[in-house]
Amino acid sequence: MPERTTDEVLLNKAGEGDQAAFLELYDRYREPIFRFAYRLLGSVEIAEDVTHDCFLSLIRKPENYRPDRASLKTYLFAAARNLALKHFRDQGRETAMDEVTQEPQDSPRRGPLRRLLDEELATLVREAVFSLPPLQREALILFEYEGLSLNEVAEIAGTDVGAIKARLYRAREGLRRSLRPYFESNQELNSGREIVTLREA
């Protein structure tokens, strides 16, 4: 199947029972959807369930996806968000969204002290992100970690771009406040600030 085949064509074929079309869609979007669910929920098992349910609902009810209103990627992120929020409601933990980041990759040229400091900073970043209010955390995950545009984040969150910009601003200020004492007390990290560098909204 040509690489340029659109999501809509693939979805139509998948709805007609074309397994190859479904697998191509799954391969395109499974990893980012799983990663997003994992960062929100903090559980591999539950994130796998959310990812599975996203694609299952897409095949069972393809009419719910409206290509004139959103991209398939945005639709799947929104579906994953709704399933994650449902999980929190079912567990009575709606405001307890967790955020799990990957540890920085070691370079063989980095010394033990540098690696130790990077790991310590990664843990602090995780804790700082976790301390953010859920809506700020969600905006940060989608924009910073998943690289979505402001418009896409707004569509997923069901709000406008202005609200997302405000949430990102507050999230960034919160992270800077949380991490400033660590940077100020540790000169070894002067060259490691890229770990928390945030892209412009």
Image (cartoon, rainbow, N blue to C red):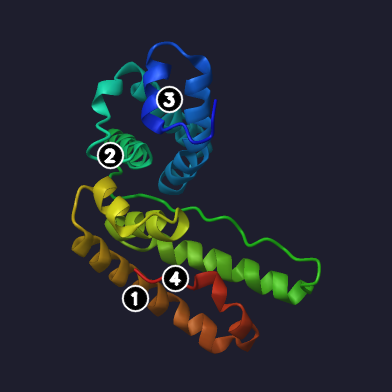
SS assignment at label 1: helix
- The residue carrying mark 4 is 198
Return the residue nearer the eye: 168 or 176: 168
Q: CA distance from mark 4 to mark 1?
A: 11 Å
> Callout 1: 10 Å neighbours few (<14), some, many (20+)?
few
Q: Is residue 196 above or below residue 134?
A: below
* Percent position of residue 76, x then y: 36, 36
* Percent position of residue 28, x then y: 50, 36
- The residue carrying mark 2 is 92
- The residue carrying mark 3 is 10
Task: Give the residue at the far top of this rendering.
Answer: 17
Q: Is residue 123 above or below residue 92?
A: below
Q: CA distance from mark 3 to mark 1?
A: 42 Å
* Percent position of residue 114, x then y: 71, 75
Q: Are marks 4 and 3 in contact (CB under 8 Å)?
A: no
Residue at left 54%, top 30%?
A: 2
Is 181 situated left or right of 81 in this image? right
Which amino acid type is shown beneath numbered disc 3?
Leu
Where residue 82 sits, quadrant-wise, is: top left
Marked residue nearer the N-terminal end (4 or 3)? 3
Which amino acid type is shown beneath numbered disc 4?
Leu
